[in-house]
Image (cartoon, grey):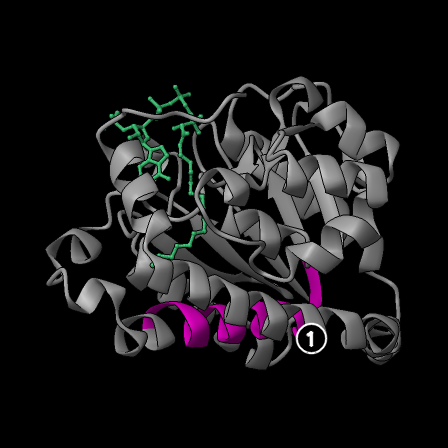
Amino acid sequence: MSDETADILYEVRDRTAIITFNIPSKLNALNGEQYLKLGKFMERANEEEGTVMTLIQSTGRFFSAGANFADNRLMEVDPQVLFSHEYWLGGFVARNVWLTNLFNDHKKILVAAVNGPSIGLSTGLLLLVDLVYVNDLSKFYLLAPFANLGLVAEGAASATLFARLGWSKASEALLLAKPISGADCYNVGFINKHYNGKFKSTEEFNQQVYKEVTDAFENLHEDSILQNKQLLKLNRDQYINHANSQEVMRGLGKWLEGVPQTRFAQLATKDVKHKI
Ligand code: CO8
């Protein structure tokens, strides 16, 4: 059993590993250490014996508000270090490549129970899951606000937005940093199912998604599922892996230039806010 007060929870229930974002007061924004923890849980879920599915779910009203702009470690860093290769190669380049690969290379059926909006790097990771279930389309949007933060796409979003939403919506999301509504995401086929917000709580919704997907694979042959996943992946690996490496190289350039540091500080002091 996992510690219910932890920022990210990990649990194995029957043939499913469940990872839960548990920082509802910060809309499940994740700091550097929490993204690292998420990656370690993804590694664990990948190697978990006897599971077929990994379910990512959340708490409160947002799926995840992306990177935590008030990350204390970022604020405490010596200004000279804050613009150095040494800092961003580890804290950004290596971490993003690793996390993105972990999501893309995950062996099990990867499912997201999406209780609310998703932003930034978390959106990149969400775009890498196999099956997407949303509680309430009218409350869901995805936002890739990189152009608003002096950054470029992360989590292979430059490839996956195009693949999952089509060129026009991907351009709106990335070039104009516009939120893409739940209805648009559903109409283009990104969302497998939604429930018109009929669940009173996020927990009830999460429970339903767990039940629905586990029922769906109950009588299927496990090895066929996992091999089919590998086959599907073969077709997309090339462009996702290419995007991942290109994104971090350009992203590193942006951190060294220094614009994102300023934008993050402005978000933290609430001087700027995204247009939703
Ligand atoms: N980081 C930290 N805290 C956050 C974040 C965040 N990303 N988002 C929301 N919160 C906090 C708010 O500060 C607030 O806390 P408090 O109550 O203590 O003031 C609480 O969550 C609720 O937020 P709001 O009151 O702002 O809620 P609203 O519904 O009015 O607004 C928004 C919701 C529009 C989502 C707004 O909160 C917002 O614009 N958040 C910023 C989202 C964002 O820009 N995320 C970063 C994306 S970029 C990314 O993920 C990749 C960057 C890679 C960085 C690598 C660094 C090491």
Front position in the image: 230 or 236: 236
Front position in the image: 59 or 49: 59
Element under label 1?
helix
- State which image quarter holds ligand 1: top left
Q: Which residue is mark 1?
A: 241
Check the image and name the residue furthest to the front.
257
| Image quadrant where residue 108 sits | bottom right
Give the dominant element type of the magenta stretch: helix, strand or loop: helix
Q: Is residue 270 above or below residue 85?
A: above
Q: Is residue 103 magenta?
A: yes
In the picture, measured across the screen, residue 188 lies left or right of residue 19, that is: right
Front position in the image: 188 or 156: 156
Residue 219 at what x, y percent from top left? 87, 63
- Which span of residues is magenta-colored? 91-110
**Residue in the picture at 39% in, 67% down:** 92
In the picture, measured across the screen, residue 69 lies left or right of residue 39, that is: left
For badge 1, the amino acid type reads Asn
**Residue in the picture at 28% in, 43% down:** 262
**Residue in the picture at 36% in, 49% down:** 260
In the picture, measured across the screen, residue 228 lies left or right of residue 151, that is: right
Residue 58 at what x, y percent from top left? 49, 42
Residue 34 visible here: no
Q: Is residue 65 above or below residue 97?
A: above
Q: Is residue 175 magenta?
A: no
Residue 224 at what x, y percent from top left? 89, 77
Quarter of the image where the N terminus is located: bottom left
Front position in the image: 138 or 180: 180
Quarter of the image where the C terminus is located: top right
Residue 257 at what x, y percent from top left? 36, 59
> Tag 1: Cα neighbours inside 10 Å, few (<14), some, or many (≥20)?
some
| Image quadrant where residue 267 sits | top left
Give the mark count. Answer: 1
